[in-house]
Amino acid sequence: MVLALVLGVTACEEELTVPGGCPEFCPGGQPLLQDTTIYAAPAADSTFFGYSGWQDVSSLLVASDFAAGEARAWYQFPPRSDSVTVSDTVRAYSIDSVVIRMGIVARDSTVKGLTFYVYQLPLTVDTTTDVPALDAMMTPDALVDSIVVPDSIYRGNVQLVLKDSSLARLVIPPADSGRLALGVRIGDGKATGARLGSIQGTTGPAEYTTYVTADIADTTRRKQQIALVADANGFALGAPPADDPDLLYIGRLPTARSVLRFEVPKRILDSSSVVRATLELTPVQPWTGLLGDVTQLEVRPVAADIGGKSTPVFSLRAVKTLPISGSDVIGIDVIGLIINWRGLDPLPQTLFVALGPEGGSFQQPVFGSTRKGEAPRLRITYMAPSPVERP
């Protein structure tokens, strides 16, 4: 076995002789298998923010004593009418019961007795309301009730039923014109988190249904219901440290994505056979995943490199599921992407890195860049052409 060290500005290579004989068909010599590390082009890796905002969040975060930080969720509902229409006639009503439903997108299945506490909030709550402000609103007087999640439910709907004396805990002031805002937190000292359904998510936002008895003589038509679905929602997550322009960010709100640029030599892309390519990213802070939840890094090439407005090639994608703890380097198999960097009409040597899901994940990766920490790098294994022996 022959080891050859090739030094370059952006690459270091290890050359290995591939054993085997080819007495008749080889041009002479032996094929060479080489490993090289290509670092991202200096100062050409960047983070861009603003791809999506609060109106696009796929789920809402709630957490208590969790590695990712404290999180509180909230919902706002459209006005509840003070009358119902029965047989084309507007009727007054009395309330029999109220049912509040929420959808769990993901939670840690090992946590037993998970409890959500539901509070009635002022209508002033919005996406600028932070965790301390929400905590100040979630007083004992504002508590509506709690929902103990059955240990068998890892995802799906849970509900809170208010009737008889418990109806007094949910009273909409006349000044609020029938609108209701609810806040959700995790309690009972559980060090965990959960993701709840949102307006833009597939699970959907919270609903609340008021079951009433209409003021009508026909007893068969007295029982009516007013069903409302949240028309605004959001969450607050403990404030992260200030952004460092020398690091690379993925996820968050507003959403961040990072662009990485490389300069792989043509002798590797066009004159060799690439057999392996791994993108390596080094985190600068521990992973903060939720057991039972799946968060992935998504890497795509771009059709044209115009910075933050580059158009990803959506038909090509490499993914890697992130760990829930630790700070290990992430390696993503990208050979299916970089082979498009060669040929007569190659794609730019640029990779677009995003998070899935965006805007509703406890994971908020921060990676080293070419300016600070361990730079992004490609580890490439390729088969160099066989050297031709002179006669």
Image: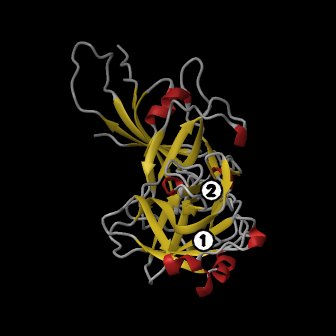
- Indicate the position of residue 167 as horizontal and vertical percent values: 55, 76
Along the line of sight, the residue nearer the viewer: 29 or 307:
307
Q: Secondary structure at mark 1?
A: strand
Residue 206 placement, left or right of 332: right
Say what amino acid the circle numbered 1 marks.
Gly
Q: Residue at x 59, y 42 (%)?
A: 352
Q: Residue furthest bottom?
A: 140
Q: Earlier in the sequence, mark 1 or mark 2?
A: 1
- Indicate the position of residue 205 as horizontal and vertical percent values: 56, 56
Q: Residue at x 51, y 81 (%)?
A: 165
Along the line of sight, the residue nearer the viewer: 232 or 281:
232
Residue 89 lies, with reference to residue 386, above or below; the image says below
- Indicate the position of residue 377 as horizontal and vertical percent values: 52, 48
How far apart are labels 1 and 2 at the CA level? 33 Å
Coloring applied to the structure: secondary structure
Q: Can residue 287 be seen by looking at this rendering? A: no
Residue 163 placement, left or right of 168: left
Label for residue 248?
Answer: 2
Label for residue 183?
Answer: 1
Residue 14 lies, with reference to residue 364, above or below; the image says above
Q: Quadrant of residue 239?
A: bottom right
Q: Secondary structure at mark 2?
A: strand
How packed is label 1: few (under 14 Cα within 10 Å), some, or many (20 or more)? Answer: many
Say what amino acid the circle numbered 2 marks.
Leu
